[in-house]
Image (tube, grey):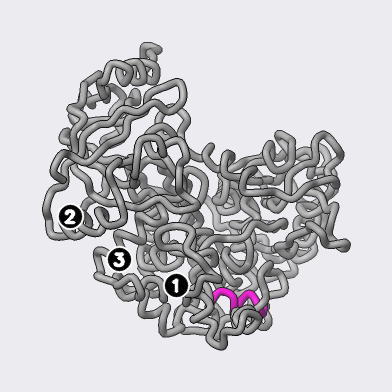
Amino acid sequence: MEYNSMTHSRIGRYSRSVSIFGVGATPFMDINDDPELEGLTEGEVFGCAAISAMEDAGIEPRDVQYFYHCSANPAFFNNCVTPNMQVAEWMGMRGRGSVHHSEACCSGYVGLEQAVMAVASGTYDIVLSGGAEMATGLPDGTKPACFRRRITTDDIYPDLVKIGDRAYARSIIGGMNVGSDNWLDLYVRTYGLTDKEIDDTLNQMSYNGRRAAALNPLALMRTPFEDLAKEVGIDDPMEYLRSPYNPKVSQYLRVTGNAPAADGAAAVIVAPTEMAHLFKTKPIEILGIGASCLEFAVPQLEMQATREATRQVYEMTGVKPEEIDLLLINDFMLGSQLLAAEEVGYLPRGEGWKYVLEGRTAFDGDKPINSSGGRTSYGHAFGASGMADVYEAVIQMRGEAGAHQVKKTPKTTFLRGFGGGQNVRAIILRTAE
Amino acid sequence: MKLERLVKPYYDALEEGKVLARRCLECGAIEFPPHYACNKCGYHATEWVELSGHGWLKTIILPAPTTDDARLKPYGRYGFGEVEFDEGVTTNVVIYGITPKKRKVLRERIANGEKVGVHKKIVDLGGYKGLHFELDEGE
C-alpha cells in the first residue's frame, strides 16, 4: 500500500555552522516517596540542567544571550503557562529573551532545531535550549510547586486524548496509541514474521535497553531483568519478559514496551562552530535537522513523517545511512526502535529484527541503538526526553559515557525525534574536525 | 479568502446520515475530513462533495487496555484500522463487527489481495454524531 497523502519540503543549508559546546542533564527520576527527592520543582530541575550545560561549556549565565524552554504540557503538569520567564530566575537569566514551546514528546528535539536556527541566522551567538518535565506527579491544588501528588492513569489518559485534533480526529479514530500497533502490524505483514518472532524481537529490545540502563547512572529503571525474573522464581530473563508478569497492553506491546514516566531535565549550549575557542569542549556540529508533522488520524503517520524528515536531512547534508555510527530513537512505544531504524536506513529493510535478536543493536553491539537504555528503561520525562537524547549523543561522541559507552566512539549520530500529534525531527550530529 | 464554517456543516450532515468532504479545485483529490486547502498537492481552494460512505478495509488493530474507548462499547465489538473510501482517500477509523477470530480471517484475505468492504455507521458519541464504519453484509 502506498502512503503519500501529504506535501513535501526541501531544506537549505545553515548560513553558518552551529555546534553543541555544552550539555547538562539531571537523572530521570521518580521523586514520589523519596525523602531525598520529594518536593523538587520544575524550576530546580531545569535550572540544574541548564547551569550544568553552562559549566560543561565553560561559560556563565551572563554569557548566554537567549534561551528556549520546553515541556510537553506545562498547564497540565505544572499548573502554569509561559514558564520560560519563571525558569529564567533559576539560572541568572532574568530579563533575557526566551521562548517556551510544547511539542509533547518531540519538544526537546524541536528545542535543538530552534536554537540552531537562532544561531545559524546570526541573530545570537550563544543560545541555551532545554527541556524539563515533572511527569510522575501533578500539582497539589493551588499550593506552591514543591507540593505535588502522584499521577494516575485516570489523570493522564484524558490528557493524552488532546493530542488528536478536536475538530475531527477524536470523533473518527477512537482509542489512542493505535498508530504504534498499526506500523508494527504493517511490518509483520510485509516481512511475514510470526507472532513469536515479533514478540521475541520486542522483548529483546526491552532486554537490550535494560542492560544499558543498568549501567547508566541517569536512567530511571536500572534493575536488570535477570534480577526481576529471579524475584518471581524464573531463571531466564527472556522467559520472564514473555510471561504473565509482563502482560500485553496493546496488540503487540507488553508492559515493558511502554515508557515509564519520569521527572527530569536536560539542556544544551549551541554556538557558531568558528567560536570554538570560547569554550572548553570540542564542538559537536549539527549538520542538519529535517522536520515533518502529521495529524493523528493520518494513516501510518510515524512512518510517513519519519520518511519525509529523513529524506530532507540526508538530501541537505549529503550524509549516507552507512555513515551513521549511533542511532537514538524516541521509542516511548518500543516498536519505533526497530521500525524507525529501518526507515532511516540504519538497518536493512525487513532484516532489522534479526539484528535485534542477535544483540547487534545493544549498546555494546556493532549497530548500537538507544545506548542510554531507551525510553522504556531510561524513563520518559516527556518534554525533556528529546534533549536527554541530545545529551546522550554528545557524551557518547566525546567518549565520556562511562560504563554504557558504545564500542566504537561515534563520529556521526542520527536522532529521530517523535511525539505529540505527531511531530518528527531527523537530526544528524557529527564531531567537528 | 472567505471565512467559512466547515466543521459544523460536517457534523450537521452526519445528523442527516451524510458524509461530507472537500475536493481540491486544482488536482481533484478528496480532502477528508473537510479542510480549506488540499493536503495532497498544497493548493489553497476546495469545494464541498458528498462521499458514498463506502470503502475498503486495509488494516485491522484490536483494542487493548491502552487503546480501548469506553464510548464505543454500546455499539458492539470493534477494531481500529485504515479504510480507503471509494473516492480514494484513506484515513484511520473505527470499524464495528471485528472480533479476534474475524480479524484473523480478514487479515489473511486482505494479505491475499481480496477486498473487504465496509460502510458508514454513524453513532452517537454523547451529544453529537461520529462517523465510524462496519463490515459490509457477508464480510
Disc 2 or disc 3, which is closer to the eye? Answer: 2
User: Which x, y percent locates residue B112?
Assistant: 13, 60
Q: Which residue is mark 2?
A: B110
Could you say which disc has been placed on residue A188 in the image?
3
> What is the spatial separation of the Cα atoms under label 2 and label 3, in whole angstroms?
14 Å
Relative vertical location of residue A109 with respect to residue A27 in this rendering, above or below = above
**Type of amino acid at the residue the image marks with label 2:** Ile
Residue B131 appears in the rendering: yes
The magenta stretch spans which residues? A208-215
Front one among A344 and A301: A301
Amino acid residing under circle 3: Val
Point out the tag, 1 or 3, that comes first from the N-terminus.
3
Residue type highlighted by circle 1: Ile
Q: Which residue is drawn at the image coordinates 22% and 46% (left, top)?
A: B57
Instruction: Name the secondary structure under disc 1.
Output: loop
* Residue that badge 1 annotates: A324
The percent position of residue A35, horizontal first and vertical second, equals 88, 61
